[in-house]
């Protein structure tokens, strides 16, 4: 089915829904690299005008990637909740955008609607929105998950403590963990990207993390971000695995390039649930995503990178993860060229994930060869805080010495909590108070006052 619109006596035609979505997407280097981007600003506006008039029901009948050839498509279609969709089933994309910005789209209504939305519908609506629109809607969403603490409550901001080490030295990792805890980071997860995926090395780190959490009764969860097959192997040996991690994408081919499929994700989730390590809940999965991953694997199937990213959220939603975050600027300038593109992509990702019912965090980050700097990240960090992001990263000095990219620091989490009057996860906040790390006002106390440092 072709879609058309006219601007200044020039008629623009778009062959199918996949093409229309790509042409309507805000400019970014990845779509240009893939040959999918609009050739001019006017063509982009023409595509957005045509997209606004597309009925939402079309997305249920015109698949971007055929149902028969892609298991992510099948999961999205088969899990669609028609009852929830009935609230908005008569809308066009433009009408959905306008409704989302209205007063009727409150927190409770958006929670009820989440299972009735498809990733493609939400991606389409986001393409018609300004940055402030994406923030406005996302901050109304509340997505709460639980394992050893409660993440996602309004008025709360969590941080992943990311103590990576270039040689997986347990002492180096432990030093960074203590540093992060003393700055109030770690309530989302203490999550380590291992330098190698060696099961023995991963087991050593897992055991060290579990010992630290148990010794100091820290109400948080750990994760070693190894490949999911390594986690399954270790869980079968009853290793102390809290959250199971995996990078995922929005197409079957992308996930195949990661060495995974839906069946493997189900196997891992079942294994983690069997360990029964959660104390307040059983959200056991942790996913990371990023715009450009499908294109970099030559697995995008002609779909623009932002819509591919939203489809990854459709996959993640099925597994009810405790955490999911877009590593927004990590893949590089080939996909998001500069600070402006990174900021836009992060706000899109956060908006799409939250609307689909996911506990979205964002790794506010960039690579050293991108046209971006820490001022861009400060801007994005603040915008995401206003938008109600569930969590950010806490990296020593904001410079990951193992992955060699720039992210956010322990101090950045303190800054955001302070200026926006946000607090850590409630169970973790109580622990910080007991340890003498913060006072009742949430202010960080001098390091010498901390029981944790004295015991360490």
Image (spheres, rainbow, N blue to C red):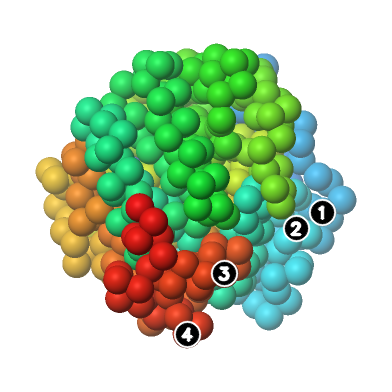
Say left or right for 119 vs 88.
Answer: left
How busy is the neighbourhood of tag 1: few (under 14 within 10 Å), some, or many (20 plus)?
some
The residue tagged with tag 1: helix, strand or loop?
A: helix
The residue tagged with tag 3: helix, strand or loop?
A: helix
The residues bearing labels 2 and 1 have C-alpha atoms spaced at a distance of 5 Å
Which residue matches tag 1? 84
Say left or right for 184 vs 49.
Answer: left
N-term-proximal mark, 3 vs 2: 2
* CB contact under 8 Å: marks 2 and 1: yes
N-term-proximal mark, 1 vs 3: 1
How busy is the neighbourhood of tag 3: few (under 14 within 10 Å), some, or many (20 plus)?
some
Residue occupying the point 21% across, 32% down: 166
The residue tagged with tag 2: helix, strand or loop?
A: helix
Which residue matches tag 2? 113
Which residue matches tag 3? 430
The residues bearing labels 3 and 2 have C-alpha atoms spaced at a distance of 33 Å
N-term-proximal mark, 3 vs 4: 3
The residues bearing labels 4 and 2 have C-alpha atoms spaced at a distance of 36 Å
Residue occupying the point 70% across, 70% down: 107
Q: Which mark lies nearer to you, 1 or 3?
A: 3
Which residue matches tag 4? 441
**For residue 333, which quarter of the picture?**
top left
User: Up-down: is 51 above or below 410?
Assistant: above
Quadrant in the picture for the N terminus: top right
């Amino acid at each position: 089915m072709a879609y058309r619109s006219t601007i200044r006596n020039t008629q623009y035609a778009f062959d199918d829904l996949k093409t229309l979505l790509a042409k309507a997407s805000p400019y970014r280097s990845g779509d240009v690299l893939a040959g999918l981007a609009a050739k001019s600003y006017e063509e982009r506006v023409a595509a957005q005008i045509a997209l606004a008039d597309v009925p939402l029901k079309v997305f249920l009948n015109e698949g971007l990637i055929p149902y028969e050839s892609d298991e992510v498509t099948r999961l999205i279609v088969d899990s669609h909740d028609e009852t929830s969709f009935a609230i908005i089933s008569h809308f066009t994309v433009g009408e959905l955008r306008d409704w989302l910005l209205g007063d009727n789209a409150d927190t409770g209504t958006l929670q009820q609607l989440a299972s009735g939305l498809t990733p493609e519908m939400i991606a389409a609506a986001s393409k018609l929105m300004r940055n402030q629109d994406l923030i406005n809607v996302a901050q109304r969403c509340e997505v709460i998950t639980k394992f050893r603490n409660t993440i996602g409550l309004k008025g709360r901001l969590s941080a992943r403590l990311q103590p990576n080490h270039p040689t997986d030295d347990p002492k180096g990792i432990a030093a960074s963990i203590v540093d992060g805890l003393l700055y109030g980071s770690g309530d989302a997860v203490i999550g380590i990207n291992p330098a190698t995926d060696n099961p023995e090395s991963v087991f050593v780190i897992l055991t060290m993390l579990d010992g630290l959490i148990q010794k100091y009764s820290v109400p948080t969860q750990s994760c070693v971000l190894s490949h999911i097959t390594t986690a399954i192997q270790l869980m079968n040996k009853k290793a102390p695995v809290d959250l199971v991690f995996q990078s995922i994408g929005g197409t079957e081919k992308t996930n195949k390039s990661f060495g995974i499929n839906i069946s493997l994700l189900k196997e891992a989730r079942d294994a983690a649930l069997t360990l029964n390590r959660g104390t307040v809940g059983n959200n056991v999965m942790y996913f990371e995503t990023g715009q450009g991953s499908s294109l970099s694997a030559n697995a995008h199937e002609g779909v623009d990178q932002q819509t591919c990213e939203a489809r990854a959220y459709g996959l993640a939603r099925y597994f009810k993860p405790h955490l999911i975050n877009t590593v927004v600027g990590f893949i590089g300038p080939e996909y998001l060229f500069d600070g402006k593109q990174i900021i836009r992509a992060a706000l899109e990702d956060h908006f799409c994930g939250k609307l689909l019912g996911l506990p979205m965090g964002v790794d506010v980050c960039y690579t050293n060869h991108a046209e971006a700097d820490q001022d861009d990240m400060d801007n994005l960090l603040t915008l995401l805080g206003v938008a109600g992001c569930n969590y950010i990263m806490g990296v020593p000095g904001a410079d990951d010495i193992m992955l060699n990219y720039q992210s956010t620091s322990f101090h950045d989490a303190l800054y955001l909590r302070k200026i926006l009057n946000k607090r850590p996860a409630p169970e973790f906040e109580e622990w910080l108070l007991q340890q003498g790390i913060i006072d009742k006002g949430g202010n960080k106390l001098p390091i010498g006052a901390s029981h944790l440092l004295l015991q360490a």
